[in-house]
Image (cartoon, helix red, strand yellow):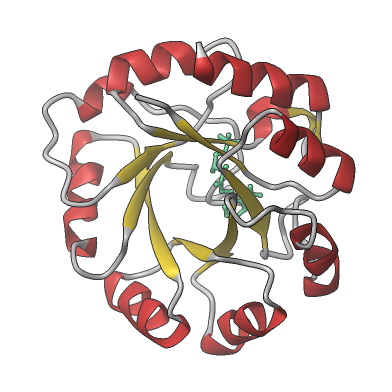
Amino acid sequence: MPVHTKICGLSTPETLDAALRHGASHVGFVFFPPSPRHLDFARAAQLAARVPSHVRRVGVFVDPDDALVEEAVASGTIDAVQLHKTAASRVAAIRARSGLESWAAVAVKTRADLDAARAFAGAADRILYDAKTPDDAKLPGGMGLRFDWALLDGFRHHLPWALSGGLDPANVGEAIARTGASLVDVSSGVESAPGVKDMDKIGAFLKATQS
Ligand SMILES: O=C(O)c1ccccc1NCC(=O)[C@H](O)[C@H](O)COP(=O)(O)O
């Protein structure tokens, strides 16, 4: 079964094109000012215009208000929203209001954290299992942290899901084999510095998902 791949936090035409050239199925644009990957909508529009229609453009948000989501929808830059630190009721409301495919990020450190995913059944279209970042961390994602994949053993998923958190070209093959993920997501594992994507690492990551 082919594994789909989202390269998240793209911010330049060159690195976006590398992701597209090497077969990414999804590209992620971060709309969260504290992030080194943050984009304004004008910049996102320049990038989004390069993306062919068979590739999904995912907007990454942290508990956004309606105005921000409406601005994103109006900008025409995204096909889906990925919502971090967002309650199930808000995910459902954003999904209904925007009409966009909606992903709920679930921050995982322990098996109990996985139970939070159940709350999103009927509210979201997909769960993104991501590593939980420390309480005092600046970002809820994109930190290169990995959770224990064994936590997913035997877990009954209530929605389609994706695996994220600390993936890189060297470990993504094992991650796919270990968890059975059909969609994987990466950000800092294909960077040379926070927010600086590396075209060679993007290529290596996508190659590793296909072997
Ligand atoms: O990447 C960010 O800067 C970011 C900021 C705020 C919320 C989420 C963010 N990233 C979400 C992602 O989808 C990342 O790809 C995911 O957390 C995995 O990151 P990494 O462990 O660095 O591969």
In the image, 181 versus 35, the foreground residue is 181
**Is 82 positioned to the left or the right of 78 in the image?**
left
Instruction: Residue 122: give x, y in percent of width and height.
Output: 19, 68
Instruction: Residue 181: give x, y in percent of width and height.
Output: 34, 29
Q: Which residue sits at x=61%, y=66%?
A: 78
Q: Which residue sits at x=58%, y=47%?
A: 137
**Is 52 positioned to the left or the right of 109 in the image?**
right
In the image, 102 versus 33, the foreground residue is 102
Q: Which residue sits at x=77%, y=37%?
A: 194
Instruction: Residue 193: give x, y in percent of width and height.
Output: 81, 31
Q: In this view, does 159 lie above or below 211?
A: below
In the image, 5 versus 39, the foreground residue is 5
**Is 130 positioned to the left or the right of 44 in the image?**
left
- Asked whether residue 196 is in view, the answer is no
The number of numbered badges drawn on the structure is 0
Quadrant location, ligand no. 1:
top right
Instruction: Residue 60: give x, y in percent of width and height.
Output: 58, 60
Corner quadrant of residue 59: bottom right
Q: In this view, does 101 lie above or below 18?
A: below
- Asked whether residue 38 is in view, the answer is yes
Q: Is residue 96 above or below residue 115?
A: below
Q: Is residue 103 above or below residue 13?
A: below
